């Protein structure tokens, strides 16, 4: 069956080396991965902590939605939606005022299935806290990456878009958006 939805709402959410995961490993296309929704004034992921929505078969991965005034992702922490099958990776939608990625932090959507039937990567959208079209005040990457990639499929299997709407975007120390 389908994976459940994970929804967290709190003034402060901290993931220090822990994991939040919505995953589909079923052989059924109907068994989609669980979506993850987090709403917090302050949201911190560090020390290899990760938030994952993955699909390892024909079902689509769930989406990751985060709404936070201040979001800090650091020290090898990962926010990722991926597929290693024919289902599509989910989208990552971040509504934030201040977003900081540092020390090898990663926000990624990927398709890693080495087959012509590989699913597509999902879109990554970063914007202001009021949603569509609003600008985040600051998006800052220091030695960190935001990426969408594919490793298989056909010309129809696409890495998705990365859409960042912000007043200021800073990339330092080898940071990448790719």
Image (cartoon, rainbow, N blue to C red):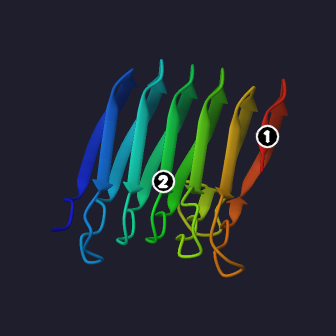
Rendered position, 111 above or below 58: above
| Res. 85 image quadrant | bottom left
Which of the labelled discs sits on residue 21, or is there none? none
Crowd class of label 1 (few under 14; some 14 to 19; many from 20; radius 10 Å) = some
Identify the residue at horizontal 71%, vertical 58% (top origin).
165
Picture coordinates of residue 128, whole percent (x, y): 60, 55
| Res. 121 image quadrant | bottom right
Which residue is labeled 1 in the image? 176
Picture coordinates of residue 135, whole percent (x, y): 68, 56
Identify the residue at horizontal 25%, vertical 64% (top origin).
26
In screen coordinates, is 167 left or right of 157? right
Q: Residue furthest bottom?
A: 156
In screen coordinates, is 21 left or right of 80? left
Which residue is labeled 2 in the image? 81
Identify the residue at horizontal 65%, vertical 25% (top origin).
104
Rendered position, 140 above or below 23: above
Q: In terms of depth relative to the viewer, which is nearer, 134 or 83?
A: 83
- Which circle's residue, 1 or 2, is located before the other in the chain? 2
Q: Secondary structure at mark 2?
A: strand
| Res. 14 image quadrant | top left
Q: In terms of depth relative to the viewer, which is nearer, 162 or 55?
A: 55
Q: Secondary structure at mark 1?
A: strand
Picture coordinates of residue 7, whole percent (x, y): 25, 51
Q: In terms of depth relative to the viewer, which is nearer, 85 or 55?
A: 85
In screen coordinates, is 162 left or right of 35? right
In screen coordinates, is 91 left or right of 15? right
Picture coordinates of residue 77, whole percent (x, y): 52, 28
Q: Alpha carbon of mark 1 to alpha carbon of mark 2: how far?
A: 18 Å
């Amino acid at each position: 069956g389908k994976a459940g939805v994970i929804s967290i709402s709190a003034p402060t959410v901290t993931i220090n080396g822990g994991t939040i995961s919505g995953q589909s490993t079923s052989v059924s296309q109907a068994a989609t991965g669980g979506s993850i929704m987090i709403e917090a004034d302050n949201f911190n992921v560090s020390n290899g902590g990760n938030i994952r929505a993955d699909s390892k078969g024909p079902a689509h991965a769930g989406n990751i939605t985060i709404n936070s005034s201040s979001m800090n992702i650091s020290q090898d922490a990962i926010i990722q939606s991926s597929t290693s099958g024919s289902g599509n990776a989910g989208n990552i939608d971040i509504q934030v005022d201040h977003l900081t990625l540092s020390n090898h932090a990663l926000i990624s959507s990927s398709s890693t299935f080495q087959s012509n039937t590989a699913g597509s990567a999902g879109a990554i959208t970063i914007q202001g806290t009021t949603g569509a079209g609003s600008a985040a005040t600051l998006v800052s990457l220091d030695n960190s990456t935001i990426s969408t990639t594919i490793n298989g499929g056909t010309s129809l299997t696409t890495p998705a878009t990365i859409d960042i709407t912000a007043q200021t975007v800073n990339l330092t120390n080898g940071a990448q958006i790719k």
